[in-house]
Image: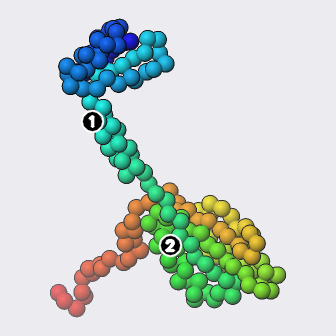
């Protein structure tokens, strides 16, 4: 077998019994790292430490991943504009936080005969949120439900900075001189 030493140096091709003796003397483990090569490659290392460091790297990688959360607002074709405003305000907040928003309109009874009302509502919601969102999945019917998926626009990843709020302007008072 080909042996790599504890400090990463190439020891060379040696017998298995000699490699095991060298690992025992160093109080480390003999680990086969490439069994399919000719001759097989083994390494002298602290296997427990190796496993711990690998697990630690995997944990850090999982922490760095961004989790995309999907929030949902549910409406009906008869939902009035005032209540729909509350829902779109929540959707705007979620989109600014980087979450996706699923807009669902559920039909009950004979409401299903007027899908164009729901389609119009979904288009209005998309227009209201067009400044911060893009339509990822256009409106589609699934049974008695019409869905649409909105995702945050690329530029809306950061928190709002208070734009649109008028700053006080100091103008000279003509009465005071």
Mark found first going from the N terminus, 2 or 1: 1
Quick one: label 1, few (<14), some, or many (20+) residues within 10 Å? few
Q: Secondary structure at mark 2?
A: helix
User: Which of 97/48 is in front?
Assistant: 48
- x, y percentage for residue 56? 32, 44
Residue 114, by quadrant, is: bottom right
Mark 2 → mark 1, Cα distance in angstroms: 47 Å
Residue 24, by quadrant, is: top left
Disc 1: which residue: 49
Query: Residue shown at 50%/56% (left/top)?
Result: 154
- x, y percentage for residue 77? 70, 83
Q: Is residue 79 visible?
A: yes
Q: Secondary structure at mark 1?
A: helix
Query: Residue shown at 49%/67% (left/top)?
Result: 95
User: Which of 153/91 is in front?
Assistant: 91
Can you say whether 165 is above or below 19 in the image? below
Q: Farthest residue toward the left?
A: 177
Disc 2: which residue: 92
Disc 2 versus disc 1: nearer the observer: 1
Can you say whether 143 is above or below 26 in the image? below
Query: Residue shown at 56%/68% (left/top)?
Result: 101
């Amino acid at each position: 077998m080909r042996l790599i030493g504890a400090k990463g140096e190439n020891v060379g091709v040696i017998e298995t019994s000699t490699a095991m003796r060298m690992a025992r003397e160093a109080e480390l483990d003999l680990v086969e790292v490439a069994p399919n090569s000719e001759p097989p490659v083994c390494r002298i290392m602290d296997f427990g430490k190796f496993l711990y460091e690998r697990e630690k790297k995997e944990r850090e990688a999982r922490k760095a991943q961004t989790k995309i959360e999907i929030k949902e607002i549910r409406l009906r074709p008869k939902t009035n504009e005032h209540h729909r405003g509350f829902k779109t305000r929540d959707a705007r907040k979620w989109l600014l936080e980087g979450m996706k928003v699923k807009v669902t309109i559920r039909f009950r009874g004979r409401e299903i005969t007027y899908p164009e009302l729901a389609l119009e509502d979904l288009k209005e919601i998309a227009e209201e949120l067009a400044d911060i969102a893009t339509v990822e999945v256009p409106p589609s019917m699934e049974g008695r439900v019409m869905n649409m998926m909105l995702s945050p626009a690329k530029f809306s990843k950061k928190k709002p900075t208070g734009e649109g709020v008028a700053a006080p302007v100091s103008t000279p008072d003509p009465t005071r001189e």
